[in-house]
Image (cartoon, helix red, strand yellow):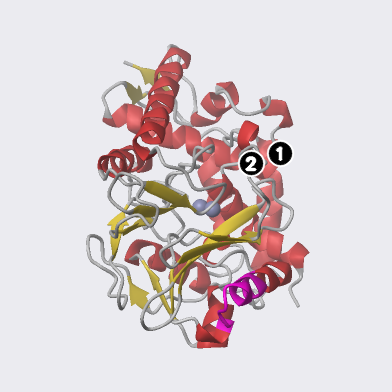
Amino acid sequence: MVDRGYYWNKFSLQWARCTAQPYVRYADQAAERDGEPMTQVTDHGGGVHSIKVPIPDNPLGHTLVHVLDTDRGPVLIDTGWDDPEAWDTLTDGLAATGVDIGDIHGVVITHHHPDHHGLSGQVREASGAWIAMHAADTAIVRRTRESRPGTWLAYLSAKLSAVGAPEEHLAPLRAAAAERGRMRTLPGLRAALPDREIVPGELLGLAGRKLRAIWTPGHTPGHVCLHLEEEHPRNLPGRGRLFSGDHLLPGISPHIGLYEGPDDATVTDPLGDYLDSLERIGRLGVAEVLPAHQYAFADAAGRVQELLDHHEERLTGLLELLAAPLTPWQLAERMEWNRPWAQIPHGSRSIAVSEAEAHLRRLVKLGRAEAVAGSEPVTYIAV
Ligand SMILES: [Zn+2]
Ligand SMILES: [Zn+2]
């Protein structure tokens, strides 16, 4: 039995990173197109099904777990949140397609977030399936499993302090870190360690299928999309189908924050990575996108362009704000979110600041903004 309260405490930050709560376009939050039936299982044709696996207490609603038939047995793409109701929905959904959970041959994970990777351990226990993930995200799973309770919170409060977070934001984080620091271990609920590596550009070696891994860093450093390079079963024009994970969704702009953690301080440019990966995905010319949330859609290139335009507009808007020097925290306070800053809850503010920092990184890399020398906490200004 899962203690949900505990679970949420442990993963709330990680989860918020996944769902981009400050950034979700809520017009689409029902995640249903008009008239689309609320079926739990959808047959997409050509040996591909999707199952709507619920995410407890979250406006995003569900993860679409895809089931791909292969000559060696069914393979899952993502698994869903680790929760009893999610597990029951997954196993019932599989049963409705004639698959017993024990028959699952393998699990391909688009990225390490718990609404995708959460149930992997239970699937492996029930079936002996292998679990494949990109090495960069596997490294995060390993670090999370090995890190001491409280480490992440202590790291986060120090980091937020350095970018100008006020004391009222830091105090609860410090208190939580100290409380966790007294715990010896976090009981249970450890994400499964993958036992196979997804190698970018290569076919996954699934019997009778052509599924190619495309590395799409940005939302996480090891996010992958999976290109099913087979003719579309309904002959839609284009090159096959794309399992897009959280990288390309029809009505949500995925959260792009920073990759850094307590054990990895490498300075990266996640927004730059994301925009590059988007352009590459746009050029694939796929017939249909099968995302991990919301619904399947056809116009991948059009959606990519919308997202590129959205980020360009946002970067331009930030430059106007940076006419005077601002800390990343002050910038986040002034950015446009889906609700006024005063109404954004504590956890989501931390996420919003990491998104502001990702945008600052991009502007600095493009030579459009710079850190003000000697400022502490650090401030940035447009150049
Ligand atoms: Zn995610
Ligand atoms: Zn997700």
Question: Which quadrant would the N terminus be assigned to in this image?
Answer: bottom right
**For residue 345, which numbered disc appears in the image?**
1
- Specify the quadrant of the image occupied by residue 75: bottom left
Chief SS of the magenta region: helix
Please report the bounds of the magenta region as a residue range.
90-101
Quarter of the figure that contains the C terminus: top left
Q: Name the residue rendered at 63%, 45% in the picture.
A: 36
92 magenta-colored: yes
Badge 1 vs badge 2, beta-carbon distance below 8 Å: yes
Q: What residue is shown with label 2?
A: 348
Q: Is mark 1 within 8 Å of ligand 1?
A: no
Q: For ligand 1, tell me if the residue under mark 2 lies within 8 Å.
A: no
Above or below residue 362? Residue 90 is below
Residue at x-position 68% and y-position 24%: 340
Whole-Å distance between the Cαs marked 1 and 2? 5 Å
Q: Residues within 10 Å of mark 1 (few under 14, many from 20)?
A: few
Position in image of residue 254 (x %, y %) = 49, 42
Q: Is residue 153 visible?
A: no
Residue 143 position within the rendered picture, expressed as x and y whole percent measured from the top left: 45, 68
Question: Amino acid type of disc 1?
Answer: Pro
Q: Is residue 87 left or right of residue 198?
A: right
